[in-house]
Amino acid sequence: MGNTSSMLTQYDIEEVQEHCNNTFSQQEIASLYQRFCQLDRNSGGFISADEFLSVPEFAVNPLSQRLFRMVDGLNFKEFVAFLSAFSSRATLQHKVEFIFKVYDFDGNGKVAFSDLLDVLRDLTGQFISEQQRELVLTHVLEEAGYKKDSLLVLSDFMKILGNTGLKMEVEVPVD
Amino acid sequence: MVMISQRNPLSSSTSKMSKLTTSSSELDLDRPNIEDYLPTDSIPQPHAKLRLRDLLDISPTLTEAAGAIVDDSFTRCFKSNPPEPWNWNIYLFPLWCLGVVVRYGILFPGRVLILTIGWIIFLSCYIPVHVLLKGHDKLRKRLERALVELICSFFVASWTGVVKYHGPRPCARPKQVFVANHTSMIDFIVLEQMTAFAVIMQKHPGWVGLLQSTILESVGCIWFNRSEAKDREIVARKLREHVEGYDNNPLLIFPEGTCVNNHYTVMFKKGAFELGATVCPIAIKYNKIFVDAFWNSRKQSFTTHLLQLMTSWAVVCDVWYLEPQNMKPGETAIAFAERVRGIISARAGLKMVPWDGYLKYSRPSPKHRESKQKSFAESVLLRLEEK
């Protein structure tokens, strides 16, 4: 217990704001800091696996493992940068980049069929067989003009998702 | 409708595709529908044909996850809000210091004195009664009940407790069970000073455990251990025996299973609601202006919590004894529990959240994730068949 937001100086807030390209207001950053401290129960400076998974709403999410790998061990500045894709001020490009990063697990800038399959498996679990999943993916890929062994890059993602009116926003509660 | 087209390589197998592989773990029909509470944007509308962008667009799921990272209703239930500091200027600060002096220097010793006197009186009556009246069970029980009520009153006095009871006083009748929302262990003391309830509690270590095994035994208590799974069946059996027993004290149960911060209620466990007894709800609401009575068991021990209460000005709360409820025909235990939770939350002004209090100690079951996966899988297959 304790008002740890008093430990965040104006300089700190501005630094974080710059790091996330002004996608969050100063009030939102202060709120996020309170939340960060609330989740970081052992005050280690980062949020561990246990602490993330203790939020049941996060733990039941099918993509929690993938997201967790991206956010594991981040300090507060990087935590805010991670969440900046969900701000109302984030550009569409930024949001699509984020989605791309979720798919591109090994971070080599290319999304292969296996990456697409992995995410689809996370989302559908055991309710579709592996074979069916491959068939569905191959089918929609070919329909969109790609082949099964195509490697998708960020510009492909921009093309596919760019004009769908992507809704990916989270409101930061400000007291 | 399946249209066979040469372009669709899956046409021959679409009939097989439309059948979902059934999951080996049946969705637990016993739980209330969490989907009623959680956002359902992740279920896409199954009207248009499935395209690559629909599979790539994982934004609804990501938004849900990010929303949970930023704020979630479960953590809110256990947040103790520190009181706003108001002693920030030249005349308020000395007043506050004076208040601290009064509280710690005058009130606290006075309260410790009252409590000590109370314990002396209690023990000097209780021990003789307990030992000498071994043969006269009925009389001994009545005296012990009165004595437990007495020591609880002393406890309440030691925090300058101002408790307002509303509603008809509970009476000891067979086939009835009392349920209340849970904020701290002092809930039990506040209720016990009016009526000697039997209670079901988690076994605690230390001096609390000692009290539990000696004095509370006399009013009739049932112990359980959260960490033991088999324990549940044993406890269920003990509950049933107690409720059906003839001369037992009325049983008080806190169905939330854990302490919540008096702004929210978490899901009630159905154990109390499937005993075939009348359920009498009790709502407790503490007035935060005087002291925050929420016992954050992760942050403080019970001793620290009590000391905090004894050095505050007062503990002010309202207790409402609400109308006894019976299970409606055709109602499941879960639905009954939720209905009673609604009654208690409405009376005490608490918000209901769909989480199980035990998630404080364990991970959520994979069933919730599976139900999300199932609905997504269903919509994918459905849209695949749309032409």
Image (cartoon, coloured by chain):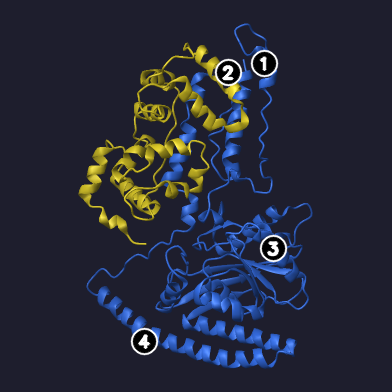
Chain colours: A yellow, B blue
Which chain is mark 1 on? B
Report, in whole angstroms, how far the alpha carbon at label 1 lies from the one at label 4.
Answer: 83 Å
Three-letter amino acid code at the position of disc 1: Ser
Q: Mark 3 or 4 closer to N-term?
A: 4
Q: Residue at x 75, y 69 (%)?
A: B241
Residue that label 2 marks: A135
Report, in whole angstroms, how far the alpha carbon at label 2 lies from the one at label 3.
Answer: 50 Å
Q: Nearer the viewer, mark 1 or mark 4?
A: 1
Which chain is mark 3 on? B
Please check whether the numbered discs 2 and 4 fall on a single chain: no
Q: Nearer the viewer, mark 3 or mark 4?
A: 3
Q: Can residue B375 be seen in this view?
A: no
Q: Mark 1 or 4 closer to N-term?
A: 1
Residue that label 3 marks: B234
Please check whether the numbered discs 1 and 3 fall on a single chain: yes
Q: In this view, does B375 lie to the left or right of B287?
A: right
Which chain is mark 2 on? A
